[in-house]
Structures are given as structure tokens and as C-alpha cells.
Amino acid sequence: MTTNRRKFLQGTAALGAASLGGFPHIWSKNGMLARAQDGQIKVGVLFSLTGTTAIIEESLNKATIMAIEEINAAGGVNGMEIVPVVEDPASDPATFAEKARKLVLSDKCVSVFGSYTSASRKAVLPVFEKQNNLYWYPTLYEGRECSKNVIYTGAVPNQQQDDFVPWLVENFGKRWYLIGSNYIYPKEENNYCKKLLAELGGEVVAEEYVPLGHSEFSSVINKLKAEKPDVIFSTVVGDSVVALHRQYHAAGLDPETMPMASLTTSENEVAAMGGAAAAGHFTSAPYFMVWDSPENQKFVEAYRSRWGGDKVTHFVSEPSYFQIYLFKQAVEKLAASDIDPNTIREAVKGEQFQAPQGLVKVEPENLHAWLRPKIGRCKSDGQFEILKQSADWLEPDPYKAYANQSCTAEGLKEV
Amino acid sequence: MELVVSQLLTGLSIASILMLVALGLAIIYGVTGVINLAHGEFVMLGAYCAWFLQTQLGLGLIASLVPIFIILALFGWIIEALVIRHLYARPLDTILATWGIGVMAQQAVRLTAGGELRYVEMPAALASSVNIFGATESAYRLFILGLALSLFALTWYIYRHTSFGLKLRAITQNRDIASSFGINSARVYRSTFAYGAGIAGLAGALVSPLKSVSPEMGTTYVVDAFMVVVLGGAQSLFGTVASSGILGELTGFLAFHSNDTIAKALVLLAIVILIRFRPQGLFSARVRS
């Protein structure tokens, strides 16, 4: 990129000469900051509509668009309209970065909502940090990130596991088999899981990672038969989840005595593997489609009437929806002339919203969301039965597995 | 004892799936010399046929097997007639052409059936597990093993004991001389391609209850299939069986004692080393050159 600097300068100089007036403010630091104007608030929507992760990201795009439409239909934000600029990054991290740059620099969006995979978030992060813009990330993820340019509305490991792991130990036992796909997310989740297990006197009988996209689990199942663990803690993702569950089911293993406990199996994955293979296994998440609240009823009904009666909502599409409302509440507090990423970030700190999953709040220190995770057991009809909701609102702590680090408003602090 | 048996069964189960997937490729490559990169997509199309027949027409998996074989064989027949037959003299171009066919098949499925992951229901009669010497194995996996062996036996019989097989062997040895003896080699090639595609379709249908069905699923299978064929030797049917057996047991053994990531790497390493010293594969047919 640095070699392009000269070309960029030459290019902008030529452009500036051609279109006088538009460009000069690009040189002053504040002028560079995207801003709302003319009664419009431009925001970027950056979810893949094509490529390998398009299936799931399309549902995030739909939830986002629906929230924006609802807000505009109800009169917008202080009379201003939210204008979504939708880009398709095609499931490719490099394209994510390129589209993010376009949304921030040329469309001058005051915020961008996007990403499902950690790889794509990592790819756009430098853009938002350099341009001092704001990225809103709805997915549960591995934590261990601290940026003042990202609002994280999905769960981090401590929120999914703090209740889940003790509950499983109490109900099923202490011998755990950890299995995940071979990349960063499962490894970070397992780091935290091992820490919790050690505190509870649990034992990890095996920790195993299979290649991404792996679909032959007969050896794993053999090991499960030999080890007979009390709990299988699974962070396997994508089509491997489907293969693992289907082969577990075919092998005649029993979820009553050896359940799989997953952080990644949502209604979406269950639909792909069939209810019979998923029934009896557990998932921990802040949101399930069956969650009984007036807000969720409204959300599910609106989603189905807008996008189709057979569509499911899940624990990533719901944050994609409510984070737009958090954005709206933050912008509402600002004067029309004062809407830019910096003021939005300050305004959203501590902001609360009654989301479909329940009340959520943005933690001022690390910009992650306070959530109340639930434990669900899958039924053969493809929906979950919610067994337990955490008694307290759980504070997000993206560095909980690392005792000597914490994320503060000033950035990462080493203790 | 129990552990040994269950280890052996696991290896055999992996091997049977490998063999199913590789058999079609071995036949096509062994006879026509076409490196069919669309093979994985034939497998994928077979799986989608199973899904379609089950969800749209309510046909069970076992009842769908014959229709799926016919559909995919027909598909292979058409592909051969439209594209492949023009490229027999240009092996490099067949790679590009078959790869292109694969990409088109993937996107066509994505556009028509959608990109979501799908699954196929297992036949109810085979959904239980069976006890063998104290080890339990899924009845469905044993069914796949049995069917894979029967398909191999059938192929072997056609190859060795029918007049079609005789022509096939003659052409494999020398196409020009075989043609000069009055064998219609173009027709034999087309039938072979269709048969190979049909077997690939069956493989896809049979694995679909165990794995997920998606437009990209073929990519992994084509790699596995090539591994088997390269190791076994391109023109040897027996080599295909033996090498899937070896790879299955080896993968099962390594994965049990370490994990699947390491098993995959070690197996590939073993193949690389082997073809360094034995480029023709473990078994090679005696072909006069």
C-alpha cells in the first residue's frame, strides 16, 4: 500500500483540479471524517451476498435492512432518514477491505454494519482504525480484540460459557472431550473452556481439531466410543457440524449420556442437518428463535412477512437487527450537525435497548454488549427448548481467558 | 479385541467411501486417459439427485439408487458427446474443459437448488447399529461397504468376462489397432464415460446421509479420488480397491492415534514419497508400449 501513496497523491491532485470545491476538505483531518448531511444518515451494509458464506450472511443483510426500513417507516432518526449503502464483499477478506474503504472514503458512511467471519473482520479493521470510522459486528466471536472502532454485539467466550460449562458439569459430569475446527475461534473458546473446567475440577480427556470442511468423523466417533466422555464440547463449524451430527446419530450414540454441547449450532445449522440428528444436543447462546418475549414475537413475524414464511432467525441475525436500533438511539442523542463516527461512539456507550433476546447494553469500556445467555436443547422439529437463562446480565470480557490483559476505553491494558 | 475390530471397521468404512468415489474416476482415466476434474461434481450431482428425489418425490434412498445411476450416466453420456470426444487427442485441454464443466455444474446447482446445506434421510431399516465381535458399527456404513464391494465385483466382471470388457481392454492397450480390428472405440469410450459418471453419482447418493450436501462438496471428493487412483495405479481396477483399502485403514489408524489433521497430512506425505519412487502407482497393468 505504501508504494501507492505517490500515485494516490497524483491522482487526487488531478481530480481536485478537475472538480474544484469538492476535494479540499480531504486534507484537513476533521474534514476527512464521514458526516451525516442533508437530512440523510448514510450507513454501510457489508455482508457477503455471493460466495461460500453468502447463505448465512444474506440473513444478516436481511435483518439489517429490515431494521433500517422499520426505523425509516417510523419517522427516521430525529426526522432524518437512514440510507443504507449495500455492498457485496463476496466472502473474500480482501474484497471486504476494499469495499469497506469505498464505504468509508467515497460514500462517507458514518458507520458500517457487517462481517460474519473473524477473517473478514480482521481484514476491515485497519480501514476503520485508520479512517477513525465505526464498524458494527454482530457475530459471536473468540474475543481477544480491543478496538475503539468496532462495536461488538455478539457474545464473547465468557458470555457463552460462564453458565453453560458449570451447568453441564453438574448435569452430565466432569470428563470432557473438546473438538473443534482447526482455526482461531475454536482454539480461543477451548482455552477459556479449559480454564473453567480446571476451576470446577473437570478433566479434558482429549482436545482435537479437524481440518475446516472435514466430513469424515468415523475416527472421532471411534475415539468417543473408547473414551466415553461425559460431555462433547463442540466448536466445529460449517458443513463439518452437519457431518459430525449425522455420523454421531448414525453410529447410534446417545445424547442422553454423551451430549454434544455447542457454541455454534443455531437454528440455521439444525435446518441443514435435520432435527433427528440434532435432537437432544445443547447450545448456549443469547438468542433462540423460540425465545418468548413480545419483542421477539414481533421480530420473527416481521422477518417472516418481509422475507418469507419459511425463514429462520438465529443468534447472529438477531444482533444484526438490534444493533441498528442501538445505532439509532445513539444518533438520536446528537445534534444533526454533529453526527460523525466519534460522536456516535461516545453516544452509544452505556446505551440500552430492549432487543428480541432481552435487554442489551453497550459496555463503555470495551464496546462489547452485555447479554443474558440461554441454554437450549434441540428438539426433533428443529427448534430449541430453552432450559435456563443466566440469572445475571453477563458482562462482556474479551480477555477473560488472559488474566494479565484487559480491554479498556484507552485500549488494551497489560496488568 | 473390541478396539481392534472397531478400528478395522472404521478403516474399511473410510475405504469403502474412498473406493466408491474413486472407482468412476479410475475407470474413466484408466480407459480413456481423460483426467476428469468434473468427477467431484458428478458425485455432488448424485447427492443432489438423492435429495431431490427424496424431498420432492418422496422416494427413499435405496429406491432412488437406480434412477440416480441412470440420470448421471445419461449426463456423462451427453458431456462425452458434446465436449470430451473432441478432446481425446488433447489431454491438457480436457483438464481445462472438465474443470469448466465442474464449475458450471456447481453454479447451476447453486442457482436452482440454492446454496444452503442439505441432507438426505437415511433408510429407516439401516438407521440402527450392528454388533460385530463386541464392536458396534452403523448398519448404514456396513451397507455402503457391501454395496461398494458389489459395485467393484460388477465392474470387475464387466471388465474381465464380457465382450464389452474385452473390447475395453483391447482399446486400453492400443486404440488404433483395436479400431482396425473393427471395434467401435468411440462408442466404447462413450459408454465407459457414462458408466463412470453413473458410479460417481451413486457414490454421491450413498454418502449424502452421512455428510452434508452442498454445491461445493465435490471439491474434496475429487482430491480423495485422485489420491486413490494415483496410489493404486491408473489402469488397474484391483489397484483402486487395494489403495482405497490401504488409505482407509491408514487414515483410520493415524486419526485414532493422533487426529484427523495430522492423519491427512501424513497420508498425503506418504503418497508423495511413494510416487517419487513408484510413479506408476502400486499396481500397474502390463501394457505394451
Image (cartoon, grey):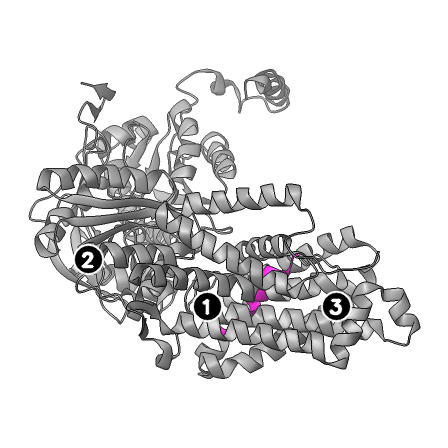
For this orientation, the residue located farthest to the front is B1
**What's the distance in space between the residues labelled 1 and 2, CA to CA?**
39 Å
Q: Disc 1, disc 2: CB below 8 Å?
A: no
Find numbered disc 2 in the image and state the secondary structure of the residue it sits on: helix
- Please say whether residue A49 is one of the residues in the magenta stretch: no
Residue A40: x and y in percent read 39, 40
Label pair 3/1, CB-CB below 8 angstroms? no
Q: Chain of mark 3?
A: B
Kind of residue at badge 3: Glu
Residue at point 62% right, 65% down? B238
Q: Percent x, y for residue A358? A: 16, 51
Residue at the disc numbered 3: B80
What is the x, y in percent for residue A10? 63, 17
Amino acid type, residue under disc 2 in the picture: Glu
Q: Residues within 10 Å of mark 3 (few under 14, many from 20)?
A: many
Tag of residue A295: 2
Left-right relation of A268 to A192: right
Please give the chain letter of the residue carrying mark 2: A
Local SS, label 1: loop
Q: Which mark is residue B208?
A: 1
Which sits in the foreground, A3 or B266? B266
Work out whether residue A186 or residue B89 is closer to the camera in this orientation and state it: B89
Where, by quadrant of the figure, is residue B141 drawn?
bottom left
Q: Which span is picked out in magenta? A: B37-50
Quick one: A283 or A16, which is closer to the camera? A283
Residue located 30% across and 43% down the image: A79
On residue A276, the disc is none
Q: Nearer the viewer, mark 1 or mark 2?
A: 1
